[in-house]
Image (spheres, helix red, strand yellow):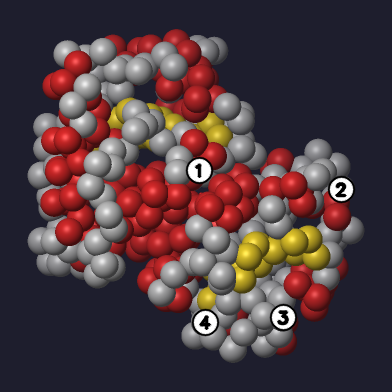
Amino acid sequence: MDITPIALVLMTATSDHSPNPPLPYEGYVFAHQHLLGIADISEHDITYLLDRADAAVEISRQVEKKKVALRGRTQINLFFEASTRTQSSFELAGKRLGADVMNMSVGSSSVKKGETLIDTAMTLNAMRPDILVVRHQSAGATELLAQKVGCCVVNGGDGAHEHPTQALLDALTIRRHKGGIARKTVAICGDILHSRVARSNIMLLNALGARVRVIAPSTLLPAGVEQLGVEVFNRMEEGLPGCDVVMMLRLQRERMAGALIPSVREYFQFFGLDRKRLAMAEPDALVMHPGPMNRGVEISSDVADGAQSVIQEQVEMGVALRMAVMETLVERFDQINSTTGGQDD
Ligand code: NCD
C-alpha cells in the first residue's frame, strides 16, 4: 500500500493554520478507521489531532465558518443517552465541515420498540452514512457497533469506559493556555468511579507526559486506580497544592447503585471546589469541567464563573476538535478506499 499521498494531504492540511511549530508529519498516517478510545491511539495521533483542531478554531472564529471537507457526506449522531453539549457540538462540527447531519435520539427511535443495538446500526448503515457518532450507556457498545458498519465511527461516550473527544478537547484547552501538557500537574476531582471523562483524560494526559492526580473519596475511586498512572488523594487539601489544572467532575448519581456519598451538602463541604480550595492550587491554575455542572455540589458558582475558569472555552474547543477528528477520519477512509478499492482493515 502506498501511504505517501495521505501523508502529504495531512501535512498540507495542518501547516497553513497551526500556531504551533509543524510536527514531523512526513510519512505519518492516521492509521484508524474509527476513534473509539484514547487507549487505541498514539501520542503522535493525539498531537496531530490537536494541531489540526487549532486550525479549526481559527475557522470557527471567522464570520464565514463553513468548510467543504465533508460536503456531500452524511453524518448520523446516534445517541442512546441524554446529551446536550456533546451532541450539539458534533452536529455543529459536521455542519461547519459541510456534511449533512442527522440526529437520532433514542427517545424517537425504534429502540424504544425493542430493536437491538446491532439492528439499529445495520439499518442506519444501509443508509450509507460516512460517519456515525455513537453514545451509549454500555461500555464497549461503540466498539461492537463499529465492527458491524462500513463507515467511520466516533465514540461520543460509552458507559464508564471512554469519551475520547472530551479528553482531546480538554487537552487542547490546556495546551492553548499552558503552552503544553508535559510536566503539568493536573488534578481530576470527584466521581472518578463512574467517569469515562476521567478514564480518557488519565490516558491522554499520561501519554503527553503530564503528572496526573485524582482526588476523591475512596468510594468514588475504581479499584486499582493507581495502576492507571495517577497519584491518589482522598483530601482536596492534600491533592490541590502545586496543581496547574483542576478538573472537576459531576457526581453521576444516575450510575450510582447505592449511597456512595453521605449527602450532597457534605460532599460539597469536603470535595467541592470553592474559592478557598482553589487558592491552594497554583495561582494561575485553570478550572475545568466537562459539564453538565452541578453548582453547589462539586463546584461553587463563583469559581465556575471566575477568572480562572475555562469551562466555556472547553465548549468552544469541543467543536473545533470534533471538526479535526471527523475530517481526519474521512480523509483517511477515502485514501484507503481509493488505494485498495474498498478493502479496509
Ligand atoms: C460527560 C459525559 O457525558 O460523559 N459530559 C459530557 O460529555 N460533556 C460528563 C457527565 O455526564 O458528567
Give the foreground label among 2 and 3. Answer: 3
Give the foreground label among 1 and 4. Answer: 1
Q: Which mark is residue 203?
A: none
| Residue that carries the numbered disc 4 in the rendered image | 308
| Residue that carries the numbered disc 2 in the rendered image | 259
Q: Going from the N terminus, do you reach mark 4 or mark 2 first?
A: 2
Q: What residue is rendered at 69% in x and 64% in y?
A: 213
Task: Tell whether label 1 touches label 3 (CB within 8 Å).
Answer: no
Q: Quadrant of the N terminus?
A: top left
- In percent of width and height, residue 125 lies at 32, 16
Give the foreground label among 4 and 3. Answer: 3
Give the foreground label among 1 and 2. Answer: 1
| Residue that carries the numbered disc 1 in the rendered image | 38
Q: Going from the N terminus, do you reach mark 3 or mark 1 first?
A: 1
Name the one closer to the observer, 333 or 116.
Answer: 333
Marks 4/3: CA distance? 16 Å
Q: Going from the N terminus, do you reach mark 1 or mark 4 first?
A: 1
In the current view of this chain or complex, which residue is farthest to the right?
262
Beta carbon at label 2 within 8 Å of ligand 1: no
Marks 2/3: CA distance? 29 Å
Q: Amino acid at mark 1?
A: Ile
Secondary structure beneath disc 4? loop
Q: What residue is rendered at 71% in x and 41% in y?
A: 255
Marks 4/2: CA distance? 32 Å
Q: Is residue 252 left or right of residue 132?
A: right
| Residue that carries the numbered disc 3 in the rendered image | 241
